[in-house]
Structure formats: structure tokens, C-alpha cells
């Protein structure tokens, strides 16, 4: 955990739940349960079309922040199907997930990830940049893959803006598979990512970037992954749709 920076738990609802009323119900449930918990930054990222209902359900409680699963880098214009940062900010969105592997699979490139991160920072929001390898190889090529993803995402990002950057290490083989990375794998990658950022900006500035883990995090494994993996929090997919389990994950990062 970084000195003076609370751990971060991000719930990525992906393309769930099935209706606006269910999204409002979930939003209200989280508001109720999270209002009693402090010392952890919690973000809920519903599909954009549900932001209004979750925003309303959360009301002024601010017991969690709102996140978006994607944003366009332009302010407005001819970008069919896209959502801009000013639109998201109207619903009090302050965190944007960028370059999730499910979006990279649809063609989102490192260049686009970088353009989005620069726009997110300029808008005063925090970008959660997802990086991760498809598989692990004995030659350690996955390390150069992660290094390239991190370096390309950070092009032209000034060191004074690093507190608006979170890196989510999400190995593709662990996402939605029920096979989480081991605490040792996570610790290795956390140190590696911090080293890459330190090499660019220096150690003191690199300490401003929270490095979180995502990939089959559950109520059962969160505590161990947090304590032994030494990460600054989690990006949670499937389990973020289950209030009981999500709260268990949030509680698991209060102490190490
Ligand atoms: C994700 O979608 O970023 C993710 C980590 O999913 P899951 O927790 O379901 O593996």
C-alpha cells in the first residue's frame, strides 16, 4: 500500500445487469453497505446507459465513486456509438477504465489507450489503464509485453499527473476464468510495473501510481491476494455484481 494513498477497489459490471431497475437496485444496495466503510476508495463502473440510475441511487452519499468502462478522447462530434468525458462527468464519473482486454480484443490499440489516458487526465478524472499478457511463457516474454503496454500508455503523461493514473494488472488467462494469478505472480508483476514506471519518472513520482490486480478476485481469495500480492487494490468483474461478495472484497483491503 502506498503511504497516504488508500487502496482502490473497482467494480466493473461489464454489460450487466439486465435492466435499469436492477442497476438502480444494485446502486442503492452498495450505497447502504458502503456507507459504513472508510479508508478504501471504491468505484462502481456500470454500463454508460445505467450511469444515470446508479448516480441517482447513490444520491449525494458519495459512499462510492462512479466509473465508466470506456470514454472517447474527443469532446464531442462525429463519433457514432461513443460517449465523451464531458457527458460522463455530468453524472459525476471520476474514474475511467481504459484498454480493458475485452476492448483491446475489439481493436483498441496502445496508441488509442494513450490518447484516452491523456484526455482523461485533462478532464480531471483518473484513468485505470489495464495491461496483461495472454499467456505466460518460460522465456519471460510476457514481461516485455507488459513493459511495452505500460510505456505506450504513458507517452506524454507528465509526472505531475501520475496521481491520476492507476495501472490494473489483469492477465487475460485469469479474467472470468476462476483461475486467479498466485500472490507470488501478482507481487512479481506489481514490482515489475513499478520498476517500469520508476525508470521513466523516478521512484518518488512512480509511488503515486496505484498498481491493482484483476482476474477472478473473489470474497474467498481477496485477503490473501492483497496481503501477499502487496497490490494497491483490485479490479473486480464478476464478483462486483454480488453485493455481499463485493463488500467482503472491499473489507479485505482495510488491513495488511
Ligand atoms: C475484469 O473484467 O476486469 C475482471 C477482472 O473480471 P473477473 O473479476 O470476472 O475475472
Image (cartoon, rainbow, N blue to C red):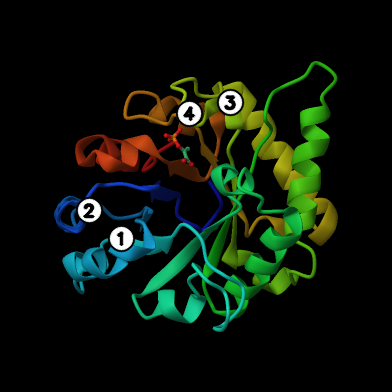
Disc 4 from disc 3: Cα separation: 16 Å
Question: Against 22, is 80 above or below?
Answer: below
Residue 34 showing in the rendered view: yes
- Label 2 or label 3, whichever comes before in sequence order: 2
Q: Which residue is mark 2?
A: 34
- Label 2 or label 4, whichever comes before in sequence order: 2
Question: Against 253, is 157 above or below?
Answer: below
Disc 3 from disc 1: Cα separation: 29 Å
Question: Residue at 58% across / 25% down in the picture?
Answer: 173
Q: Are marks 2 and 1 in contact (CB under 8 Å)?
A: yes
Front label number (2 vs 3): 3
Front label number (3 vs 1): 3
Q: Which residue is mark 4?
A: 225
Q: Which residue is mark 1?
A: 64
**Secondary structure at numbered mark 4:** helix
Front label number (1 vs 4): 1
Q: Are marks 4 and 3 in contact (CB under 8 Å)?
A: no
Amino acid at each position: 500500500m502506498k503511504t497516504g494513498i488508500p487502496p482502490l477497489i473497482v467494480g466493473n459490471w461489464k454489460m450487466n445487469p439486465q435492466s435499469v431497475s436492477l442497476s438502480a437496485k444494485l446502486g442503492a444496495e452498495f450505497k447502504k453497505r458502503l456507507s459504513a466503510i472508510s479508508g478504501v476508495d471504491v468505484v462502481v463502473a456500470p454500463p454508460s446507459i445505467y450511469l444515470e440510475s446508479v448516480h441517482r441511487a447513490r444520491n449525494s452519499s458519495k459512499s462510492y465513486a462512479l466509473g465508466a468502462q470506456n470514454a472517447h478522447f474527443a469532446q464531442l462530434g462525429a463519433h457514432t456509438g461513443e460517449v465523451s468525458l464531458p457527458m460522463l462527468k455530468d453524472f459525476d464519473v471520476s474514474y475511467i477504465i481504459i484498454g480493458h482486454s475485452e476492448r483491446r480484443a475489439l481493436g483498441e490499440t496502445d496508441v488509442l489507450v494513450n490518447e484516452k489516458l491523456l484526455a482523461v487526465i485533462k478532464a480531471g478524472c483518473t484513468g485505470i489503464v489495464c495491461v496483461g499478457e495472454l499467456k505466460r511463457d518460460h522465456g519471460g516474454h510476457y514481461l516485455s509485453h507488459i513493459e511495452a503496454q505500460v510505456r505506450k500508455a504513458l507517452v506524454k503523461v507528465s509526472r505531475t499527473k501520475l496521481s491520476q493514473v492507476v495501472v490494473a494488472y489483469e492477465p487475460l488467462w485469469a479474467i472470468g476464468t476462476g483461475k486467479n494469478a498466485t500472490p507470488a505472480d501478482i507481487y512479481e508483476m506489481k514490482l515489475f510495473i513499478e520498476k517500469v514506471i520508476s525508470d521513466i519518472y523516478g521512484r518518488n513520482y512512480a509511488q503515486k501510481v496505484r498498481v491493482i490486480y484483476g482476474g477472478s478476485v473473489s470474497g474467498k481469495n481477496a485477503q490473501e491476494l492483497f496481503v501477499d500480492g502487496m497490490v494497491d487494490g483490485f479490479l473486480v468483474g464478476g464478483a462486483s455484481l454480488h453485493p455481499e461478495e463485493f463488500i467482503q472484497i472491499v473489507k479485505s483491503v482495510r488491513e495488511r
